[in-house]
Amino acid sequence: MTSYVARRLLALVPLLLLVSFAVFALVLLIPGDPATTIAGGTKAQPAQVERVRHLLHEDQPFLQRYGSWLGRAVRGDLGQSIYKNRAVWADIRARFPVTLSLALGALVVTVLLGVPAGIAAGTRPGSLIDRTITVGSSAAIAIPDFWLGMVLVVVFAVNIKALPAIGYVPFARNPVDWATHLYLPWFALGLANAAALARQLRGALIDVLEQDYIRTADAKGLRRSVIIGKHALKNASIAPVTVLGLQFAYLLGGTVIIEQIFSIPGMGQYFYQALLTKDLPVIQGMVLVVALTFVLLNLFVDVLYAYLNPKVRLA
Amino acid sequence: MQGGSIPMRPVGRRSRVVGLVTALVLVLAACSGASGGSSGGGSGSGTLRYGYDLSAQFTDHFDPAKSTGDCDAIVLRPIYDTLIHRDASGNLQPGLVQKWDISSDGKTVTFHLRPGLRFQDGTAFDGNAVKNGLIHNQPNPQLTSLQLIDHIDVVDATTVRIALKQAAPLNFIYAMGSRDGMIVSSNSLNSADKQPIGAGAFRFSGYQPGSKISVTKFPEHYDASSYKLSSIDFTQVGTGPPAVVALKSGAVDFIRFEAESYAGLKASPNVGVAIQPTGAYLQFQFRFDKPFDNLKVRQAFEYAIDRKQINDIVNAGQGEVASQTFQKSTPVYQPSLANVYNYDPAKARQLLAEAGYTNGLTIEMVIPGGNIANMERQGALIQQQLQAVGVTANITRINGSDIATNYYQQRKGNAFAAERLADPYLVNQIWNQYGKSQYIAIYSNQERQDITDLSNQAFAETDAKKYADLVKQASNIVVDNALEVPIAFVPQFIGYDNAKVGGTVKAQTDICDPPDLTGVSMKG
């Protein structure tokens, strides 16, 4: 297992180099001129624009700029936000726990709703429960998270006034307030993911439960709960684990709209504002961090595969 | 096994767990008091939770020398106050400066400070502090008025004489009502960006990035008795619908909102609404290439655009229909210009035919992108109105941060339909658009010598009446030559929870101007 993990880690190096180059090349792809924007837009004087251009190193050759940027990024220096004039890495570090809170809670909702629903449907294929869950999950997948978020806000915050509509309280300050402020976004983000997970688990369980070793276990007189819980679920979990891994990675990098709706000061909100203001160092830093998160989570999922299915280690 | 059914006791236990978690959610929600009221505390009447889009409007700088956004002023003004105030009509009023003099050549401005002023750290707010503060702010490239300063002399503790490089005294004094005129305590010049200390009515008390900025009342402010609030929490809410939802849910007490929410909030019994006319206006701006290098085409557009309909829909009928660059409440408004271009589609068609466009014409009209509701509505209405006179207007959306480069520098599109923000120093409103070497004028091909000359005279003028006459002459040129289509002046809206907020609530005088919070109080 150790050599497997080491091999995978080594394979990440060229991938990350490629990602870093693509991230830096964003500077060539983004339309408009950040220097003019920063210098004041329609109020900008030409000399001021040139000064900003120099500060952004835009007067240097592209590869030279990439080299210096990569060197600094490796040391954890992602540059300064142009708009806010603050260290990008410090801002990401401050906002990461917020988005992590959001992603972890949504993942818990996903598992709490998706796993029981997937098992209930997968172990009773064709039954009323299965059909209800299948239809329900199709509907849940079709509901956009931002729409669900707004409906939840209107119902639970505006009408019932049971939960706050907006805001975030750090866990360290008050765990109860922390959770209270996050229930609605957790549910908004988690519902569609739970539905996708339930469908994956259902399909995988139906396949696994048709295998001979399950029939043998049944013939031996093992309790159904043991057959499902101990033998079927582990083998059926490979596809759902992939889904969960991807969902978690998306949650860490893609809660932009939910953070806007609920006024949560996470990475999504930071990224959104950077896109609006063409804050290139922030955009580059965020894309790099999100890409890194994806790569590492994929690695984690692959290692989990290897644990669940030893054949993977040999491949 | 297909079609079989396996009894699932463990699932049953999980279901109970889910049920317990749900119950716990509800119990926690009930315990949290999440929608609770204002917290109060301190002297005054309580804490106002002011909905403010920190992520979009605050640049994370508490030091005016480092601030990079106009809307920082909403938070900075309570902390620092400003040397000069501007009232809702744009007139100059005393602030930390009690009165001011302008030399006859217009190159020297003398400020007389209120006696006995103190910063929030207890140090004296005197002539030296003002000099240090202005010099401290000078490197900020956005505070352009400070580039006018040649040197500053401290005459005595309450008198500061400022020599300007050129005669532009009123321009300078008007700017002292903005971030330019916010003075940082001399003891905190290096730390003001994190721990600001000013002489404003509220002192900084805390900042949670992206979430909240708190300020508490400074009882030694010269006008402390006018402020009824003990503290203000500037609380993060997104602009637009999220702000409205936050107000309705009780998460905040006070928001700025957009015109599209006016009808809904006005009808809500728990919400009070304050409206403020402003000098910002909806505008159709020409690029002076073909076809708009022809006066008859421009005049045709003046007649073709139904300003009232746009005001009714885009401004919820709460704005002022525009006939010229300045609204009725300004001293440079001219009733004689009010009916020059009344809505007349038949005349528009006739002028287009006279200009050679018998079969109509097609233009590329740029509007700000990002799905901004009032800009989208205005664009669609103009498109529809122009269609009625035979003009096909194809809409191109360009995001706000790209307008300078894409519309102006790269000259994409023939015209720009947007909202033009107000400049309290009125001559700038015309000068910035048509003056020589001005950014918009350069890229719209509309640099005009006549307006440049009049503007330069107005900059140097110290007599209010003569200054107004010069601005009126420039305004006449704009209307006579159909240099723009001013559509409607945009009002600012404030919504507040009328069960919690009392006193007199006033809306902002511009999108980034701080509202006047004197007289606002919290009930109970």
Image (cartoon, helix red, strand yellow):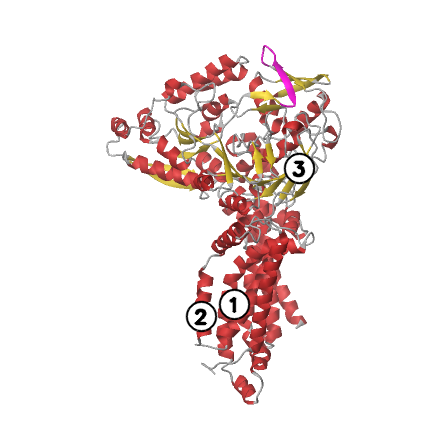
Q: Is residue B457 above or below residue B50?
A: above
Label drawn at residue B450? none
Mark 2: few/some/many CA within 10 Å (<14, 14-19, 20+): some
Q: Residue at x 54, y 61 (%)?
A: A190
- Which residue corresponds to mark 1? A197
Q: Is residue B167 above or below residue A249?
A: above
Asked if both marks, 2 and 3, belong to the same chain, the answer given is no
| Marks 3, 1: nearer the viewer | 3
Give coordinates of residue B245: x percent, y percent. Answer: 51, 46
Q: Is residue A10 above or below residue B213?
A: below
Label drawn at residue A132? 2
Give coordinates of residue B294: x percent, y percent. Answer: 33, 26
Give the spatial CA distance, label 2 vs label 3: 53 Å
Mark 3 belongs to chain: B
Give the spatial CA distance, label 2 vs label 1: 15 Å
Mark 1: few/some/many CA within 10 Å (<14, 14-19, 20+): many
Which three-letter amino acid code belongs to the residue tagged 1? Leu
- Which residue corresponds to mark 3? B215
Mark 2 belongs to chain: A
Which residues are drawn in magenta?
Answer: B95-106
